[in-house]
Image: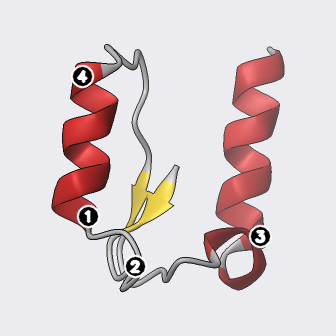
Amino acid sequence: MFGEADKNIPAAAQHFMAERAKAEVVVAIDGASHAVFASHPDEVAEVILRAGA
């Protein structure tokens, strides 16, 4: 999970790393910054709950 508007680690790099790691799920939040967990807590919680199911 990462923010598409992250200025510390560009979204293109995040996508590349996820592909290289063969990630099964990639969640990119439009408009979210590097602090996606603080700025979009509902989306983060949803991903965590889905992972535990």
CA separation, marks 3 and 2? 16 Å
CA separation, marks 3 and 4? 27 Å
Q: Quick one: label 3 or label 4, which is nearer the N terminus?
A: 4
Disc 1 target residue: 11
Disc 4 target residue: 20
CA separation, marks 1 and 4? 14 Å
Q: Which is more foreground, mark 1 or mark 4?
A: 4
CA separation, marks 2 and 4? 19 Å
Q: Residues within 10 Å of mark 4 (few under 14, many from 20)?
A: few
Name the amino acid type tagged 3.
Pro
Q: Quick one: label 2 or label 4, which is nearer the N terminus?
A: 2
Q: Quadrant of the C terminus?
A: top right
Residue beneath the point at 67% across and 41% down: 47
Judged left or right of residue 13, residue 28 is right
Residue beneath the point at 77% across and 37% down: 48
Seen from the viewer's position, the closer of residues 7 and 30 is 7
Q: Quick one: label 1 or label 3, which is nearer the N terminus?
A: 1
Residue beneath the point at 47% across and 80% down: 32
Q: Residues within 10 Å of mark 1 (few under 14, many from 20)?
A: some
Residue beneath the point at 26% across and 64% down: 11
Disc 2 target residue: 6
Query: In the displayed image of the protein, which residue is found farthest to the front?
Result: 8
Q: Which is more foreground, mark 3 or mark 4?
A: 4
Q: Are marks 2 and 1 in contact (CB under 8 Å)?
A: yes
Residue 38, horizontal then vertical, whole percent: 77, 79
Name the amino acid type tagged 2.
Asp
> Which SS class for mark 2?
loop
Residue 5, horizontal then vertical, whole percent: 34, 82
Name the amino acid type tagged 1.
Ala
